[in-house]
Amino acid sequence: MGIRQGQLAKVFGGVSASLISSWENAEKPVSPPVKRLEAYATLFATRRSLSGGSLRLLTLEELTDDERAQRKELLEELLRLREGKETRGVGASDVWTFPEGEDVTIVCAELPRELRDHMSYADPESADFVTLYTYADPDALIELYGHIRARNPENNVSFLKTEDLTPDDYTTHLVLLGGVDWNTVTAAVIERVDLPVEQVVRAENEPTSEPGGFRVQRDGGTVLFPPLLDSEGHLLEDVAHFYRGVSPFNQKRSVTVCNGMYGRGTLGAVRALTDRRFRDRNRDYLRTRFAGAESYSIISRVPVLAGKGLTPDWTLPENRLHEWPEVP
């Protein structure tokens, strides 16, 4: 279309020609924010952007159906290109897709012995022994392991309990399931990253004990987001924490934490980005809200009905209790 970078800078507003040049640099390109890629896709979806010899950015309402389809195709291509540059997987449009050939390790806590002593399936001396019965958060593990394997057929994807990790496992892409009370790797990561979120563990394992919650720093003080239980200890609403950032053990790999105060919160944090009915909208929300962020987190509600945890919809403000980084 014969458009120059200076013209793009002018029509996009708030950017310089040199910044656009850095985005288009073939040798060492800088990844542009998603909103700029959306502008690119809109601009090049129609030649009407250059009607009358002057460049202008049409609104979405001005585009025809064919132009909107072209915009969608262009934007998907641009986002794939941008994602391919983010080799650590941080800020990518799909957090469960990792660079080809890089190992992924899902880490679970071991279910405490006192909670499995009565189960023959969890006793290594029993003929009925099944290793998975010794894992905490097996619902979240099964859901996530299958999804990551399907998304990354050329990667080695494994799952381990915390005590089974080798030094080499720590330097892979880490996906941590469960909280700091049982998962020692989650605790180690949270201690090493700059995150204004602290998990306050439950007073004890009994459902009627103090439920704890996620404490965040806000306005010079702190706010606690606890789960909700009825007077008999039945869980009515759990609280889920999703964190994504650069691994403190390998700067070229990512770490992802899916955590809840109870198991249904952990599963909710996982299903937010695996459930086919919600994953696209939640992924798009992350891509827009945290564009360009190297690390980010969301604390969200997980409603529990008839004992089943529901997938949180992050596009609904009432479901998002806390986001970091905060909007400047």
Image: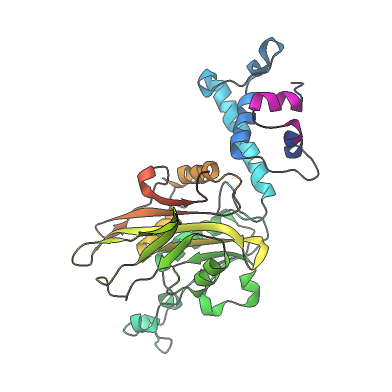
Picture coordinates of residue 168, whole percent (x, y): 66, 73
Residue at horizontal 53 percent and vertical 41 percent from the top:
288
Picture coordinates of residue 322, whole percent (x, y): 43, 52
Vertical comparison of 35 with 143: above or below: above
Examine the structure image and report whether residue 9 is included in the region drawn in magenta: yes
* Quadrant assignment, res 80: top right
Picture coordinates of residue 286, whole percent (x, y): 51, 46
Residue at horizontal 38 percent and vertical 83 percent from the top:
113
Q: Which residues are magenta?
A: 5-18
Residue 88 in view in this figure: yes
Vertical comparison of 147 with 132: above or below: above
Residue at horizontal 43 percent and vertical 86 percent from the top:
124
Left or right: 227 as drawn, with respect to 156:
left
* Quadrant assignment, res 304: bottom left
Front residue of this view, candidates 204 and 281: 204
Left or right: 62 as drawn, with respect to 84:
left
Q: Main secondary structure of the magenta part?
A: helix
